[in-house]
Image: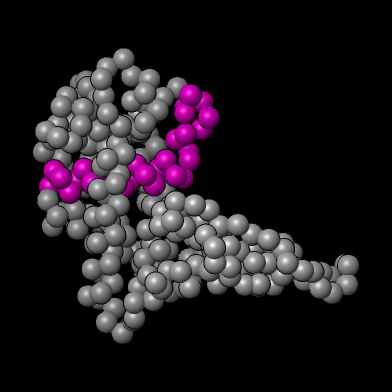
Amino acid sequence: MKINSYGEAPPVSPERKRELLLFEKQASIHFKNIGLLNLAFSHRSFANESHDSVDNNERLEFLGDSVLGLVVANWLFVNLPDLDEGDFSRIKSFVVSEDSLAEIAHSLRVDNFILIGKGEEFSGGRTKKALLADCMEAIFGAYFLDNGFKNATDLIQRLLVPQIRIVLADKHRKDYKTLLQEFVQKKYKTYPRYSVVKKTGPEHDNTFWVEVQVQKKKFGPASGGNKKEGEQAAAKIAFETLSQK
């Protein structure tokens, strides 16, 4: 099913249509073009293994990522006038992170509806946070195309504002290594590199001093009771510095 210039959607059988209608009910949304929603669920592994000529959801994911970022940034700007740009960037990074989007995807049971290939299925693809988060972005992109910016905004705010409030209440899990890696991958197409620059203290109670390098810039050193804690501390410095730019 060719959907304008959006791509070739997987066929929607009567059984598949019932599944998609169930998802719409769970998510409290409605698509005028149900094929566009089906395309949002079409993972690359499914498209590659399909006997039909179908596209994957990656173009919708790209669009949804941009729509998501704009909606969240606008909400922060309008509703939190006392915060500055650095605060906005840090809050937004937590809220649109892989962990946050995967959590939302789980709440909507997105894993039940994704179309994935057999290999991906056997390797536990339906439980992979990255896959779920990417699919969530594709759904946002598809809903924007099908229902317009206002309705997409309403959907994203309904799902993401509770996440923002968790961050504002400082009750979110601050895994700075994951946040830094996601940020660096998206912005610089590379990965952070960690190195222990020294250990201090007695052997039974070492303090580890860790640096992290992003491209050619080094952050730290920061200390921790073990290597993992040191890496988290260094990642915090790097993430908070880079996310303010």
* Horizontal side of residue 126 vs 88, given as left or right: right
Residue toward you, 15 or 10: 10
Residue in the foreground of this view, choosing between 220 and 226? 220
Question: Residue 120, how many percent across, how many down?
Answer: 47, 28
Res 183 quadrant in image: bottom left
Q: Which residues are magenta?
A: 119-147
Quadrant of the image for the N terminus?
A: top left
Quadrant in which residue 6 is drawn: top left
Instruction: Find out whether residue 145 is within the magenta segment.
Output: yes
Type of colouring? one colour
* 76 horizontally vs 1: left or right: right
Residue at 44 percent of width and 51 percent of height: 189
Return the x and y of residue 211 as percentages of the image width and height: 64, 67
Q: Nearer the viewer, residue 98 or 24?
A: 98
Rendered image quadrant of residue 78: bottom left
Give yes or no for residue 120 being in the magenta stretch. yes
Q: Is residue 13 visible?
A: yes
